[in-house]
Amino acid sequence: MDYKVLAQNFFTNVPPGLFSLLSSPNKELYLSALFVVKEAFEDELVIGRKELREQILISLENSIAAANFEEDIDEEDVVDEQLLASLPGRATFLLSKLIKKGWLSEEDSRQGFEREIVMPDYTSDLLEVLYRQTQRKDDIEENDVFSTYAVLKLADEEEDAKRARIFSKALKSACSNSENLNKTFRNLYYYIGTYYKEHANDETVRDMLEARFREGGEQSVIDAYYYPLKTNDSIALYGSSILKLMQKVERDTDLLKKIIEIENPGIIEGNAEYEEALMEIHLRIDKICDTFRNASHKIDQITGRNADYNRRFTTAVIHNLRSDHSIVSKIVKIMKKMEQEDFADTVQKKIAATTSVFVDERSLRAKTYKPEKEELNKILIRPHHEKNGEIAKLFLEKTLNGFTMIDARKYVADKMHGRSKIETGEIIKENPDFGEDDYTLLIMSSLYGFSNGEYKVIRSGEYIEINGYVVPNLLFEKIESNNTTKE
């Protein structure tokens, strides 16, 4: 690859002075104006110069008024001093700079004497990149793996008449998605190190935890990138299928020949241009295959880096926790005062805390219950389980007020009254005497729905305070049986 030619091509397509505005003393103002332009062109192909100037002025009036444009005046610029004395004049100067440096293109209007503004293709691309860097990283969602699989699978299922044409576009799209996926890997590897380093010099536990778990902090960034690759956009789920599809395409010489003819009309098989076109297609295939062959290794590298920084973070927190006597003493005071009912109620309301035990349909245990020597070391209770009935009864009385999952299922069914869905808030509203039994059955019901598929449970992340209980606001939605006949 001739990198010098690539560089020459870039500056052939992009004006050489394009980035000078971003190194100006007024760079923040120019970038703000470009973001106004980006928004203005969201639904427009062309905008009148006067109209665009007014939009910039209205959006950035204070910044334009405070700006000093003297250092932005080039030697060849002819600027009337009176122009910069008024806000409209200053906005006109700003817009002229965007046009002169190549961020915008000016054309004659077909309907009048007013000039019109259009946005060049490179400006659209660059503004997307610049704007992307202003957003919280946890707002970024990638689905490059599934997109690659979907577009290739769709092309493979097309009829022969369309197959080559669709595959031509599919290979280009899949290759682009592969590049984006590699970019995601690079970004994630970079973010893990960068965000952990942000709090490397923090001396207080509070600052460290806030830096990590706040919105936009390192944990939310890692979650936004890493977990989609492991779950809904899984390499393991689609990677092998993508590789099989690519191997199938690479062996199909007739398909490759048709793709070349579609992309290069009139090309003759056997000449240098044909061989170059064939090599270009093989490069796309190799790019896709290399990406998904190496994906697991890159994820392992990222996982190792994350684990390493997690260990460092935990060690640093423990060290600072030991040295931060103010926090230790506060924790001790809280633990001592938790025995006081008024204080415990206050803490419960402030942090949505509640006394709880671990509940699971397959294994119901409570750490506070210690069986006697003659009893079993571990108690396992299942719905409809009749063995060890006395032990089971004793255990349930000590933990879940004697309720079973059958009771939990009946509780939800009764509250629904034939409805297909119900929220916790509705249950509480219809039951003003909400108490311990309701709370216990509600929590058991949420677990039952997840594990047995009778109904699904959707968590809102919100909580409702009722009669001293902090209840998670859940939506219970009945799952219709597959055997149900639709009229």
Image (spheres, rainbow, N blue to C red):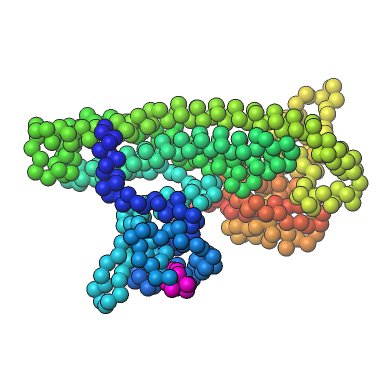
Q: What stretch is highlighted in magenta?
A: 82-91
Asked where in the image residue 335 lies, by quadrant, the reply is: top right
- Residue 132 in sight in this render: yes
Task: From the viewer's side, name the closer residue of 293 and 112.
Answer: 112
Task: For the C terminus, give its image quadrant.
Answer: bottom left
Image label count: 0
Q: Is residue 32 at all visible to an observer of this figure?
A: no
Judge by depth and name the residue closer to the eye, 457 or 292: 292
Q: In this view, does 28 lie above or below 192?
A: below
Q: Which residue is drawn at 75% across and 60% down?
A: 431
Residue 236 forms part of the magenta stretch: no
In the figure, is residue 434 to the left or right of 101? right
* Residue 147, image quadrant: top left
Residue located farthest toward the top when viewing the structure as drawn:
373
Q: In this view, does 308 lie to the left or right of 344?
A: left
Q: Quadrant of residue 311?
A: top right
- Residue at 13% in and 36% down: 273
Q: Which residue lies furthest to the bottom in this view?
A: 112
Residue 384 location (% of width, % of height): 68, 37
- The residue that appears at 50% across and 62% down in the rendered structure is 68
Q: Find residue 123 and report its horizontal and vertical position in percent.
A: 36, 55
Q: At 33% from the left edge and 57% from the top edge, which residue is drawn?
A: 102
Quarter of the picture containing the N terminus is top left
Residue 122 vertical placement versus 99 (above, below) = above
Tell me if 36 is positioned left or right of 325 in this view: left
For the stretch drawn in magenta, what is the main secondary structure? Answer: helix
> What percent of the width, then of the height, locates residue 241?
36, 33
Query: How far from the left and from the top, in percent, is residue 108?
Result: 25, 70
